[in-house]
Amino acid sequence: MKHEREGWVRLRSHAVAISACAIAWAAFGTTACSSDSDDDSQGAGGSSTAGSAGSGVGGGAAGGASNNGGTSNNGGASNNGGAGNNGGASNNGGASNNGGASNEGGAAGAAGAAGAGSIWHPAPGTSWQWQLTGTIDTTVDVAMYDIDLFETSQATIDALHAAGRKVVCYFSAGSREDWRPDAGQFQAADYGNDLDGWAGETWLDIRSQNVRNIMKTRLDLAVTKKCDGVEPDNVDGYANDSGFPLTKADQLDFDGFLATEAHARGLSVGLKNSVELAATLVSQFDWALNEECFQYDECGSLASFIAAGKAVFHVEYVDSKGQGQAKLDDVCGDSSVQGFSTLVKLLELDAWRMACP
């Protein structure tokens, strides 16, 4: 069963609840508003790679000059064979690899919403940045950015694509957040108990057709905003006090629904946490994203994704930047996370990051 810790380890952009962003999105279909991020000048995107000489709090993307042999990791000039591998200008091998400049993330490929034939399938070790709060720092040299679906402006997504990055868009699939622009579309019967520790957020009845219709619309929005993939959160209601008699079978059905609908739209989709279901769902999801499996000795449950050649994007949290290097040293050499794309982040999920080399 999933720990009650789920309520506090899943950071989303609650700090910007019921903002002008939501109003602008509802009225115009996009938002350009953002807030200043804390300490971004020392955040992600510095000149040195985390884990290499000169790195540390606020260091640059995992895989800088010395990582994985490329000038810039998973997107550098020489790394893994392409001008911009796994998110560069011609992803997955450059101009001549796997179909040339237009393949899976090239200038004319899945940098925008693409057909199902070009769904992004990140390999183990793919570099990434996860930022759900503050002004998005678009300078981090990584293959993938994971950002908020509703609150990230189209201009930011376009800028990331122009820099050769894949863009994954976050939304909560298993909870109603009362500040989202579509919150009023949920019916009273759709939402149950509050998520412990998250004001304004309640669990959803994932069996509801109305809930599923809303999720389809969110996936449509991801296509409209040219997201390459989606990160549906809170897909473990069956293991929590949701207020509904949800079963494991209900959860598997809902998670499968999300994967099928995402793929039908040409979107890559990740399995968020849900380590108990990972081995069952690995064939339906393109990658996994996990919070604190090292802390809770659960990383072995995600081995099926690595074995299948699918990325595991992994985060361990610290309370302050000063704790970052010690956490990195503790985690990166452990055999349980080998092959993972591991970051150390603050709970705020702002721009600051450190990454295993």
Image (cartoon, rainbow, N blue to C red):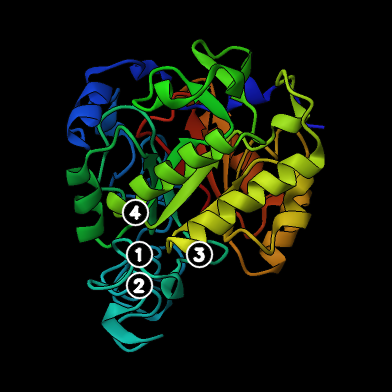
Residue 91, labelled with which disc? 2
Say which label, 4 or 2, has the lower sequence index.
2
Q: Which residue is mark 4?
A: 223
Say which label, 1 or 3, has the lower sequence index.
1
- Whole-percent x, y for residue 29 in the image: 22, 37
Inspect the image, locate mark 4, and give the three-letter code of the amino acid beneath it. Val
Inspect the image, locate mark 3, and give the three-letter code of the amino acid beneath it. Pro
Residue 130 appears left or right of 308? left
Q: Which residue is mark 3?
A: 122
Residue 312 seen in the figure: no
Q: Secondary structure at mark 1?
A: loop
Q: Secondary structure at mark 2?
A: loop
Total numbered labels = 4
The answer to the question of whether label 1 and label 4 lie on touching residues, with beta carbons closer than 8 A, is: no
Q: Secondary structure at mark 4?
A: helix
Say which label, 3 or 4, has the lower sequence index.
3
